[in-house]
Amino acid sequence: MRTFIIILDGYGIGESPDANYYGDEGSNTAYHVALAMGGINLVNLGKLGLPLIVDLPGTAVMWPPLAAVGRLRELSAGKDTTTGHWELSGIILTKPFPTFPRGFPNEIIESFKKAIGRDILGNYPASGTMIIEDLGPEHLKTGYPIVYTSADSVFQIAAHEDVVPVETLYEWCRIARNLLQGPNGVARVIARPFAGTPGKFYRTPRRRDFSLPPPKDTLLDKLSMSGYDVITLGKLDDIFANRGITKPIHCSNNDECMECLKEYQDRDFNGLLFCNLIDFDMKYGHRNDPPGYAKALLKFDDWLVTFIEGMRPTDLLIISADHGNDPLTKSTDHSREYVPLLFYGDMVRPGNFGTFNGFCCLGKTLADIYGVDGRELDGISLAPEVLKRSILHNEE
């Protein structure tokens, strides 16, 4: 059996009940992107049933839907990429990763400077595109890396590829990762290489994330230890610190991921192909760019029909998200929102199965379907809700 999970990074579908604790009241990424464009016609997502769980101006509601659709509420503390993906794979984090709204403590910065043998620039929260415009010229003169953070739990290091070789930048990130442990253990250290000239700087595709490992086994570990294939596309090898993955494929954008998805649809494997489409979040959500977001959604929607046509009778397609990133709010950061959960395939029972607490229900469901030991995974299995009949491991 083959399962394809596609994460639309940052595609939330409405504020969570606790959104006020995160300053995200009124956030609704899916609705606001469509509204900003005067409507958006996501034909294939509409047929699957997405408009049943979120108001999508311009997209027709169809009944019955082709998929089983519902929405998930995040239970972990936080709204970052790592927290979202780990919860989708069966782990609820009760303690949020640390954030540094005033920059990183002096002892961390001094230790980092000593380890890399040079000074740094920055050390404050900022937009990645803006900080390289502001500090890029000085970086070109000095060779000092640009260190910054955001509302997320991240330590980001930007360096021009003509000034600092990318492999050196990666090594600096490994150094930072070793320093940032315990109370200062940010979720991710991110390499942010860029190129260009002052006024025309741009980030290159060779970003890398250096994550903390999950605190316990995830769905990926359970599947791989049971002999199943676990193939990841996009940045997921970084998010899971390469844990539980049998074949990591590092893709830098949506187009590469969708091309690879189609390639693997024609291959035989037994298990999970887990894909993150990062452009929605990285290129459009964080930059408050509704037209770009809408264009990327339409491109994915057009691609989706050919993928669906190529599915085998025993294939399962799952579409979800890891958090919101509403481009119509003042913030350029993630938003605390419900996320969609769509199941499609010949063995799925179409309909609206409502709202469930915990992104982790996805991990629990797949552990149930594949017959692996999911007792340590958080959440409840939705298999009885979404399947026409049992497709547990021990049944044909």
Image: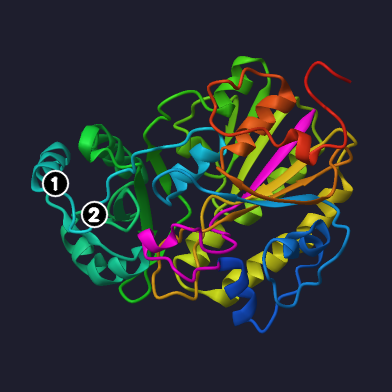
What residue do we see at 56% from left, 60% from top?
12
The quadrant of the image that shows the N terminus is top right
* Label 2, residues with CA under 10 Å away: few <14, some 14-19, many ≥20: many
Q: Which residue is mark 2?
A: 147
Q: Is residue 12 magenta?
A: yes
Q: For this rendering, which residue is in front, 280 or 349?
A: 349
Q: Earlier in the sequence, mark 1 or mark 2?
A: 1
Q: Is residue 170 visible?
A: yes
- Residue 222 x %, y %: 59, 21
- Please, what is the three-letter code of the amino acid marked with disc 2? Val
In the image, 296 versus 30, the foreground residue is 30
Can you name the residue that lies furthest to the bottom here? 38
Q: In this picture, is 282 found above or below 288?
A: above
- Residue at 61 percent of width and 67 percent of height: 30
* Observer able to see residue 245: no
Cβ–Cβ below 8 Å for labels 1 and 2? Answer: yes
Element type where label 1 sits in the image: helix
**Residue at point 71%, 60% (across, down):** 300
Up-down relation of residue 214 to residue 256 (above or below): above
Residue, disc 1: 109
- Give the alpha-carbon distance from disc 1 to disc 2, as whole Å: 9 Å
Q: Position of residue 373 (x, y in %)?
A: 62, 17
Range shown magenta: 1-28
Looking at the image, residue 85 sits to the left or right of residue 71; the answer is: left
Q: Quadrant of the C terminus?
A: top right
Q: Amino acid at mark 1?
A: Ile
Q: Please indicate whether residue 355 sits to the left or right of residue 27 in the image.
A: right
The quarter of the picture where residue 215 lies is top left
Q: Secondary structure at mark 2?
A: strand
What percent of the width, then of the height, locates residue 288?
A: 47, 73
State left or right for residue 348 relative to residue 161.
right
